Image (cartoon, rainbow, N blue to C red):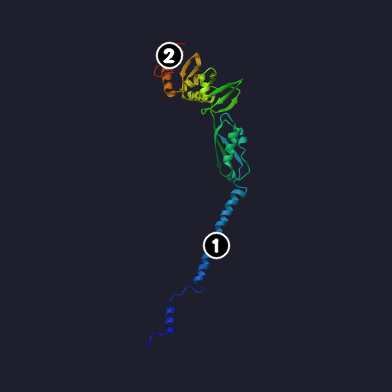
Amino acid sequence: MAGPTTAQRGAAHLADTPAGPPGTSSGGRRLSGRVRLLLAGAAVLLVAAAAVWTLYGSSWFRVEQVTVTGTDVLTPAEVEAAAAVPVGDPLLSVDTGAVEARLARELPRVDSVDVVRSWPDGIGLEVTERKPVLVLEKGAKFIEVDEGGVRFATVGRRPAHVPLLELEPERSPSLRRYGAERLLREAVRIAGDLPAGVAGETKAVRMTSYDSVVLELTRDRTVLWGSGEQGPVKARVLTALMKSSPKAGHFDVSAPSAPAVSKS
C-alpha cells in the first residue's frame, strides 16, 4: 500500500499547528513588545523631565527663608549676612560647602556650621561658636583664645570668668626652645585641666616658662601649677587641698605626689 504523498504530509503538519489569534504573527508580537518598551521609556523620561523642571525651573522649592540657630555672642542677622545664601535660587542648587566656607572666612567666631535644606523653601544654619578659655590683653582690648589655641576675636571687654593669660617668657630659655605658640597651647591645655570650681575663680594664668605656671585666684590666692604635665592628677589634688584647707592662700601642686599648702 502506498504511503502518504508530500502534499498530504504538509496538510497534516498544518493541521497539527495551533492557530494564533486572527490577524497576528510572531513579527507582529515582536513589534508590539518594542512599542510597549518605547512607550515605557518615554514615560520615564517625561517623569524625570517633570521632576527636574519642578526642582530647578518652577517657582516651587526655591529658597525663601534662612533660619539661624545656636548663636550666643553673634546675632542671627550677622550669620545670615555672612552666609549670603542665594534667596530665590532653587533649593537643590544651593552650594552648602560654599556657605560654610564664607562663614568660616567672614566670622572666625564660628567654629562649625551645619547647612541644612529645609523643604520646601528654607535653609537652616546650625552654628557652633568658639568659646574662649583664655584671653590675651592687647592695649585696651582682649584677644579671645579657644580650646584649640586659636585667637578668634578681639573684644573691648574681658569676658566674665575667663582667665587672663600673662605670657612672660622673655627672660626664659623656654621661648627660644618652644616658641610663643607652643607656650600658648600649653597654657590652654592647663586651663582645660582646671577643675570647674577653680576655673571659675581663676583671674589669671601667669606663664614665665614651660614648666613654671602660676594661677592667680580670687581672694588673693595663688596656685603653683608647674608644667602642664599630669594636669588631671594636679586638678584632683588641688580640689582635695582646697577642701581640706579652705583658708589657705597658696597651694603648690607642681609635684602632685608631694603637694604643699601655706597661708600666703
Question: Toward which corner of the image does residue 49 lie, by quadrant?
Answer: bottom right
Query: Can you tell which of label 1 and label 2 is closer to the viewer?
Result: 2
On the image, the x and y values in percent for residue 143 come to 58, 24
Say which residue appears at 60% left-offset and 48% top-offset.
56
Please rate how many residues cluster around mark 2, counting C-alpha atoms within 10 Å: few if below 14, some from 14 to 19, many from 20: some
- Give whichever of 67, 192 is nearer the camera: 192
Quadrant of res 245:
top left
Q: Is residue 161 visible?
A: no
Q: In the rendered image, is residue 65 in sight?
A: yes
Mark identifier at residue 38? 1
Q: Quadrant of the N terminus?
A: bottom left
Disc 2 is placed on an element classified as strand
Give the left or right position of residue 18, taking residue 78 as reference.
Answer: left
Image vertical order of residue 262 relative to residue 197, above or below: above
Marks 1 and 2, how far apart at CA:
90 Å
Residue at disc 1, secondary structure: helix
1 displayed left or right of 26: left
Give the residue at mark 2. 261
Position in image of residue 101 (x %, y %): 58, 37
Kindly identify the amino acid type of the residue bearing the numbered disc 2. Answer: Val
Q: Residue furthest left?
A: 1
Residue at the image point whose x is 52% and y is 70% from the top: 28
Considering depth in this image, is 134 or 178 the residue closer to the camera? 178
